């Protein structure tokens, strides 16, 4: 039987071979993985663990927080603050940045996360996840400030997500392709189950919240209209639609078998560029997608090249199979 490769071993070997993972980054990724194991455990308890329902508060974006949003946020902070690998963290569930307390050593990295993605699916037992992105803190001795987090996605040094579904799966990139690890609950460790994940270029599947169709801009409407016309339309083939409403779950399907995910700007709130957040949702997913041979665009620009202007900045996203993303960009007149 082939030896199974744990996340620890994978990271050590990456460190040796490519020098892509300095020791503190390896520690960081192990700690994030450990936190995800703990979140997975809490998620799986459901009503038995009193983790369902709302927490009775709102986050900075005006969204009602679920108990699990808060639990997952706390787990990630507690796991990461003491190890000496981080300088600060930022989260969807915290207004400002979280500085590592003075009683702990300060590290070189910044960690950003959406602790629990797909909150509307928690109480109905549908797949949810955690998304994370790692940046390097700018050089210098001064305390980290919010502006230090405003780096384009091209500067990420690691990114990934953990999906809590029928299996708990961690998907990771450090810039050398995408690797997938499945949680072995008996061993308590993540085991490498797929390396060099590639998104198929050709697809017949799209993911978008169709109920917003009447609010979309013309290029997105045109793209979806053409998909819906199927074999007799300009695309000459029938398309299938899938919408889980957890970005992690929709993207996990797309990374596994191809497809395109869109959460576009819409007319209801024209001042907002989109619904999803650039720094801890679009950038990590965008980098994973690119590392798997796909593309990530806001219709006008490569997502990873956007210069962020604030921590909770939103962005329109088109992610997935390269040909489809390029087609939508073309319809925006940018290719
Ligand atoms: P979050 O739960 O972190 O706020 O993110 C929810 C996001 C994303 O996961 C999903 O794709 C989208 O919101 C679902 O939006 P709809 O409510 O339009 O389905
Ligand atoms: Mn989210
Ligand atoms: Mn969330």
Image: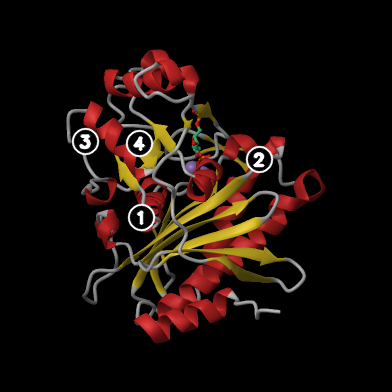
For residue 331, side relative to residue 252 (left or right): left
Q: Which mark is residue 329?
A: none
Quadrant showing the C terminus: top left
Mark with earlier residue (4, 1): 1
Tell me the distance, in whole angstroms, between the alpha carbons under discs 3 and 4. Answer: 14 Å
Tell me the distance, in whole angstroms, between the alpha carbons under discs 3 and 2. Answer: 33 Å
Identify the residue under disc 2.
Answer: 122
Mark with earlier residue (4, 2): 2
Tell me the distance, in whole angstroms, between the alpha carbons under discs 4 and 1. Answer: 17 Å
User: Label 2 near label 3: C-beta < 8 Å?
Assistant: no
Which residue is farthest top?
A: 214
User: Label 2 near label 4: C-beta < 8 Å?
Assistant: no
Mark with earlier residue (1, 2): 2
Q: Nearer the viewer, mark 3 or mark 2?
A: 3
Q: Nearer the viewer, residue 220 or 37?
A: 220
Q: Residue at x 36, y 55 (%)?
A: 287
Q: Tag 4: Cα neighbours inside 10 Å, few (<14), some, or many (≥20)?
A: many
Q: Which mark is residue 300?
A: 3
């Amino acid at each position: 039987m082939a030896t199974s490769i744990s996340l620890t071993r994978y990271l050590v070997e990456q460190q040796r071979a490519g020098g892509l993972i300095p020791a503190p980054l390896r520690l960081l990724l192990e700690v994030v993985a450990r936190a995800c194991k703990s979140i997975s455990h809490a998620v799986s308890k459901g009503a038995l663990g009193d983790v369902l329902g709302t927490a009775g508060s709102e986050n900075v974006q005006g969204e009602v927080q679920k108990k699990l949003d808060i639990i997952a946020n706390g787990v990630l902070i507690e796991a990461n603050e003491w190890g000496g690998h981080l300088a600060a963290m930022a989260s969807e569930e915290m207004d400002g940045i979280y500085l590592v307390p003075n009683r702990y050593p300060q590290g070189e990295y910044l960690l950003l996360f959406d602790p629990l993605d797909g909150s509307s699916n928690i109480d109905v037992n549908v797949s949810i996840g955690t998304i994370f992105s790692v940046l390097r803190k700018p050089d210098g001795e001064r305390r980290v400030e919010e502006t230090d987090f405003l780096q384009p996605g091209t500067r990420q040094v690691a990114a990934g997500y953990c999906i809590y579904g029928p299996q708990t799966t961690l998907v990771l990139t450090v810039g050398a392709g995408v690797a997938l690890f499945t949680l072995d609950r008996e061993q308590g460790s993540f085991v490498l189950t797929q390396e060099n994940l590639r998104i198929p270029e050709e697809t017949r599947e799209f993911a978008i919240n169709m109920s917003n169709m009447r609010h979309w801009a013309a290029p997105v409407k045109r793209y979806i209209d053409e998909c819906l016309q199927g074999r007799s339309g300009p695309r000459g083939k029938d398309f299938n639609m899938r919408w889980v409403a957890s970005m992690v779950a929709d993207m996990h399907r797309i990374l596994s078998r191809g497809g395109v995910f869109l959460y576009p700007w819409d007319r209801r709130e024209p001042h907002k560029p989109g619904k999803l957040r650039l720094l801890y949702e679009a950038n990590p997913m965008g980098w994973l997608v690119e590392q798997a041979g796909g593309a990530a665009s806001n219709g006008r620009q490569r997502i990873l090249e956007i210069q962020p202007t604030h921590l909770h900045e939103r962005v329109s996203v088109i992610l997935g199979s390269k040909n489809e993303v390029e087609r939508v960009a073309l319809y925006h007149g940018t290719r």
